[in-house]
Amino acid sequence: MINQFEVIETQQMISEENLDVRTITLGISLLDCMDTDLEKLNEKVYNKITRLAENLVETGEKIELEFGIPIVNKRISITPVSMIGGAACTCSEDYVTIAKTLDRAAKKVGVNFIGGYSALVSKAMTKSDELLIRSIPKALASTERVCSSVNVGSTRTGINMDAVRLCGEIVKQTAEETKDSDSIGCAKLVVFCNAPDDNPFMAGAFLGVTEGDAVINVGVSGPGVVKHALEQVRGQGFEKLCETIKKTAFKVTRVGQLVAGEASKRMKIPFGIVDLSLAPTPAVGDSVAEILEEIGLERVGAPGTTAALAMLNDQVKKGGVMASSYVGGLSGAFIPVSEDQGMIDAVNAGSLTLEKLEAMTCVCSVGLDMIAIPGKTKASTISGIIADEMAIGMVNQKTTAVRLIPVIGKDVGDTAEFGGLLGYAPIMPVNEFGCSKFIERKGRIPAPIHSFKN
């Protein structure tokens, strides 16, 4: 039974502590849209998306009004495009036409982003996969709302180093294609290891092949709520600290469960999962970095940062998993630099480096996220950073990802402006020693020994 105190407490979280539902993401299977005729394929894709997502934005807005819960984004995820385009696409330009169709459909239904311009190549690449990956720079430069991802590794299969090498080149090309807007195309491209099938967060969202025809997934947020709760137990022991995080994560996730259930019922589409990640924004007071500093760090990046983040991530999962029928996606704490004012401040203060961020990714939800680097950075260096992050995910049996933005024409000391939820980022220095001979080796890094579980 919900009592008056809980209603007032939730209202305070929303009005004063930046609690929101970050996204309702409608997953749509496009497997039945496959066709050998490219024009017919595009027509089927457009028609299915606009039919199933016709009321998505309106439904989200009505739930916002009725429950007083802000829903920041309404999004769509689709079947990885490399899977549906193989029979019709004979060149990269053919895939770009699909990207434009997706963008047109997203604009028609009014969603913020559509994810799934993707390829899953953790073991090897088909010709279709390679054509899609090579089309990414043009696709992201010629669309506004399309997001792209490539899964290049997994604990079960190892790391496809041919795909890693190619992705480093693609990141650079995407940066060049969108250099007039601080290489923002790269902000819509993420490279994964162990990518989840049900992730509602962009840029890595796509609908897995094990999903049904359509599904509603919800991603919650709430760093400001957690920080406010921790302020009340300042100076107390770890047991009290952990209990406070768990209880707060439970309350935040219950809000997501409520919204997911309502959206599912109203749209007559099955509910999938709640992703209980702490997703920051550039707004003051909505920062994962500030939570870590409230725990006791002078600045994020100081000694103790990785331990504090590990504890936060674990307690968020423990508290949130009890609050929803189905928890999935990424679920934990995000550490995107450009989207978190506390992270930006730590970079500017010199306490947070790329190497420290990499260490932190061993225990957080995703990986090296929304990090602006010098535009002169070599493609092989970008591939090396991707390989390092994929290795962390592969060996630790967790999802890791890389979203690097080599900002063409800018260097360390400059700032890249992305706007909106993507925020802004100081250009971070990158180790300038080369790794090209390593990246040029062909083939696959084998899966670790503990992958053999049957």
Image: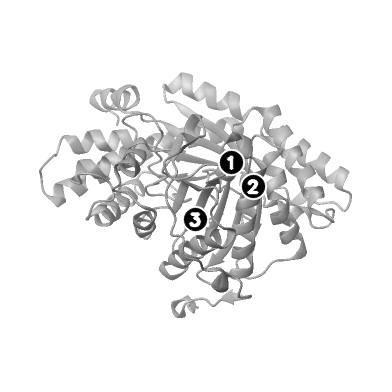
> What's the colour scheme?
one colour
Q: Residue at x 43, y 59 (%)?
A: 431
Is disc 1 in contact with disc 2, using a CB cutoff of under 8 Å? yes
The x, y position of residue 343, in whole percent, is 35, 42
Please tell me how crowded label 2 is: few (under 14), some (14-19), or many (20+) other residues with Cα within 10 Å: many
Front tag of 1 and 3: 1
Mark drawn on residue 271: none
- Three-letter code for the amino acid on which mark 3 is drawn: Ala
The x, y position of residue 410, in whole percent, is 52, 42
Q: Quadrant of residue 142?
A: top right
- Three-letter code for the amino acid on which mark 1 is drawn: Ser
Give the mark nearer the N terminus: 1 vs 2: 2
Q: Secondary structure at mark 3?
A: strand
Could you say which is closer to the camera, residue 146 or residue 24?
146
Residue receiving disc 1: 183
Residue receiving disc 2: 174
Q: Is residue 194 visible?
A: no
